[in-house]
Amino acid sequence: MPTLPFSVAPIGPVLVIEAATSAGSIALLEREDRADPWRVVSEAAVSMGSGREDLLTPAISALLAGAGLSPAGLSALACGAGPGSFTSLRIAAALTKGLAFSRDLPVFALPSLLLAIPSTPAGGPPPGRYLVALDALRGECFAQPVAVTPDQRVLVDGAAARVPREALAETADGAALVEIAVETGVHPVASAARWLGDWSSYGPVALDGWEPTYGRLAEAQVKWEATHGRPLPAS
């Protein structure tokens, strides 16, 4: 467990891992002072859930090596906290926890849907109200209200919910709808963590108890419980 009493976001370098969808990504951020904006040192896309091969670990190793760093040179880790793909989120969380435990690093759990607000070519997301939606299967979507301030900080603007797909427009209530999907080309991006401002709301988390917000049970667990008529035992 981290021993340092981090109450605000670290300065850097910070490794951010995001895997709420099959379009995973990683980024290395840093800044000189907590009052400064984050700078993206490097970033990379990582395909998740496409096979049995682990692509995330070598991608992280390559990203750090390219920046002349080892895990020991990090000041913190940040992990996309979902909701999203059960398997991909679980893999990213397990890897994040392993790195954190081995190097005694704090971990910040960043809401994945906040990382999907698109940026302008000039940099930074346009100010306004948004509803970020992600397919939750079974005719539902995960929906997260988001606000972008005039100084381009991305903030949670209400509780996340699981809503019927046909109710998305009503749920948006005038906010711009951002749909995460292959068809739209929109997905959470690790480097977008630089727009979240003060990370103190997102950690550090207790590594022995933290898990991503999966949003719903894994399909395999749902089928097991339906077959057996009882909850799947924890152990």
Image (tube, rainbow, N blue to C red):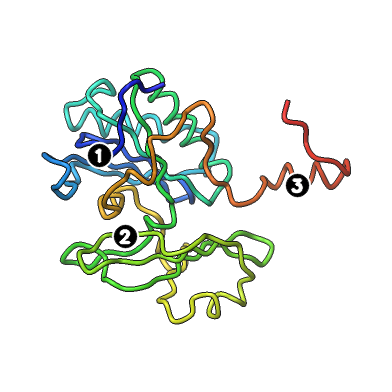
Marks 3 and 2, how far apart at CA: 34 Å
* Mark 3 lies on residue: 222
Marks 3 and 2, the one that precedes in the sequence: 2
Picture quadrant where residue 47 is located: top left
224 with respect to 140 (left or right): right
74 with respect to 141 (left or right): left
228 with respect to 121 (left or right): right
User: At 20% across and 32% down in the image, what residue appears?
Assistant: 66
Marks 2 and 1, how far apart at CA: 19 Å
Marks 2 and 1, the one that precedes in the sequence: 1
Amino acid type, callout 2: Val
User: At 31% across and 27% down in the image, what residue appears?
Assistant: 5
* Mark 2 lies on residue: 154
User: At 21% across and 34% down in the image, what residue appears?
Assistant: 13
Amino acid type, callout 1: Leu
21 or 141: nearer the viewer = 141
* Mark 1 lies on residue: 28
Callout 3 touching callout 1 (CB < 8 Å): no
Quadrant occupied by the N terminus: top left
Secondary structure beneath dot 2 equals strand
Picture quadrant where residue 187 is located: bottom left
Callout 3 touching callout 2 (CB < 8 Å): no
Amino acid type, callout 3: Val
176 or 135: nearer the viewer = 176
For label 2, the crowd category at 10 Å Cα-Cα, with few meaning under 14, some 14 to 19 and many 20 or more, is many
Secondary structure beneath dot 1 equals strand
Residue at the far left: name it. Answer: 32
Secondary structure beneath dot 3 equals helix
Residue 168 on image: x %, y %:
55, 75
